[in-house]
Image (cartoon, rainbow, N blue to C red):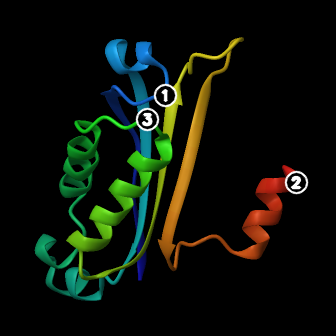
Amino acid sequence: MAIIALEGIRLYGYHGFYPEEETLGREFIVDVQVVADIEDAAEEDELSSSVNYETLYHICHAEFREPARLLETVAQRILDRIDRQFDNVQGAKVKVRKMNPPLAGPVDEASVEVSSGSLGFSVGDLVRILTGG
């Protein structure tokens, strides 16, 4: 097993609740991690037996073309498509960050993270998230 990741995928999208977000758009950053069985890929040195980074990128890019009002929707669509695309993926985690969200004050980013399978959140993860520890 291995964790294969793409971090810092920069995409421009028209996702958001407010009308100006739908017309002006903004920058988003996406991080993707997948847990995959890579034994055959490592043994055969064949990309077709692994998780192709380019395919992960194209999945994110394609889902960003379809506007959504919520980051949750975009993140879940990416996660679902990864789960459908790869037979050797046991779990995935997708984080979508909206840069400089339109709020009443300066905020660097707003984010949503979703996961499936063996990359799902444990009770310990949730406690750390909720307590800031």
**Residue found 39% across the figure and 46% down from its top:** 74
Q: Return the mark for residue 91.
A: none
**Residue found 43% across the figure and 61% down from its top:** 33
Q: Position of residue 43 (x, y in %)?
A: 21, 87
Amino acid under disc 3: Arg
Of residues 34 and 130, which is closer to you in this image?
A: 130
- Distance (Cα) linking label 3 and label 2: 28 Å
- Distance (Cα) linking label 2 and label 1: 28 Å
Q: Circle 1 — which element?
A: loop
Residue bearing the label numbered 2: 131
Q: Is residue 62 above or below residue 26?
A: below
- Distance (Cα) linking label 1 and label 3: 5 Å
Left or right: 132 with respect to 81? right
Give the mark toward the camera: 3 or 2: 3
Mark 2 or mark 3, which is nearer the start of the sequence? Answer: 3
Of residues 12 and 47, which is closer to you in this image?
A: 12
Q: Is residue 126 above or below residue 2?
A: above
Q: Position of residue 131 (x, y in %)?
A: 88, 54
Give the mark toward the camera: 2 or 1: 1
Residue bearing the label numbered 3: 69
> Image quadrant of residue 3?
bottom left
- Quadrant holding the C terminus: bottom right
Left or right: 124 with respect to 45? right
Q: Position of residue 103 (x, y in %)?
A: 64, 17
Q: Residues within 10 Å of mark 3 (few under 14, many from 20)?
A: some
**Residue found 33% across the figure and 14% down from its top:** 23
Residue bearing the label numbered 1: 17
